[in-house]
Amino acid sequence: MSLARIASFVHKWLALLVGVQIVLWVVSGLFFSLIPIQQIRSEHLIRPPAEAQTIDTATLATLARVRGDQGEAPTKITIEQSSGGPVILAEFAEGPSILYDAVTLQRLSPLSAAQASAIARAHVTLTSAPIGATLVTAETAEYRGALPAWRVQFPDGGLSVYVAQNTGAVTARRSDLWRVYDTLWALHIMDWRNHEDFNHPLIIIVAAVTLLSVIAGIVLIPYRIRFRRRPAQAFD
């Protein structure tokens, strides 16, 4: 069998075998190239940070009074300025972090749906109000951040803002555009369950088969191209 026949056989059948995945690679790659990652992450909707405010330490409660559920001292204390005033985030060696009002030491966490909605609304520039809040207690394909967390839903573009229930931190933003991106990413790396592993055997095998098909196609080029000779010109 000639080299041309072997290359033609390999190129045709391997291309048929992996053709659909090649199309998915091209389509998803084009999408990734056209849409800025900042837009996919909804970074254009984040409200600009307010000017830094000075915290009057004289009004703060004594930090030595901060204790966990079992009376244990925190391993780390952070004082932050929130829309409702200064807050204390206390972290412990065991157990969840706890958020306190920095002036009264009133415990704020776990946050209610209304509190999480207020934080989410202050985080984005949207003028519309949230239409609902759902407590998320387990990881999903859409969210793998701190748990538990409130999924605050907005009507604009299917935007969901995730707010950690214990710390009040905004941990993720997910929109319909992000969900399209995530679906295409799962198809691109061929990890349809977790959407994050691109070193698994299946994609390596398909990529190797695709490479063989491409090489066979390159070998066929000289056999497929026919160069026409220019007719000789007659001279008087």
Image: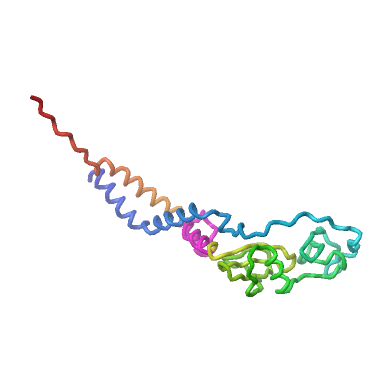
**Along the line of sight, the residue nearer the viewer: 27 or 9:** 27
| Nearer to me, 70 or 222 | 222
The residue positioned 91% from the left and 59% from the top of the image is 58
Q: Is residue 206 above or below residue 117?
A: above
Residue found at the very far top of the displayed protein: 236
Q: Is residue 198 above or below residue 98?
A: above
Residue 228 position by quadrant:
top left
Instruction: Give the vertical position of 193 relative to 208 (above or below).
Output: below
Decide if residue 22 is on the left or right side of residue 184. left
Q: Picture quarter containing residue 155?
A: bottom right
Report if residue 196 lies within the magenta region. yes
- From the image, which quarter does the C terminus lie in? top left
Give me the residue at 65% from left, 71% from top. Answer: 129
Residue 214 lies in the magenta-colored region: no
Give the number of marks: 0
Percent position of residue 204, x then y: 46, 53
Q: Position of residue 135 (x, y in %)?
A: 66, 73
- Above or below, comparing residue 4 to residue 176 in the picture: above
- Which color scheme does this rendered protein use? rainbow
Q: Position of residue 138 (x, y in %)?
A: 64, 70
Quadrant housing residue 126:
bottom right
On the image, the x and y values in percent for residue 197 come to 53, 57
Measuring 71% from the left and 69% from the top, which residue is drawn there? 118
Q: Residue at x 68, y 67 (%)?
A: 121
Q: Which residues are magenta?
A: 179-202
Q: Residue furthest left?
A: 236
Q: In the shown orientation, is residue 23 left or right of residue 149? A: left
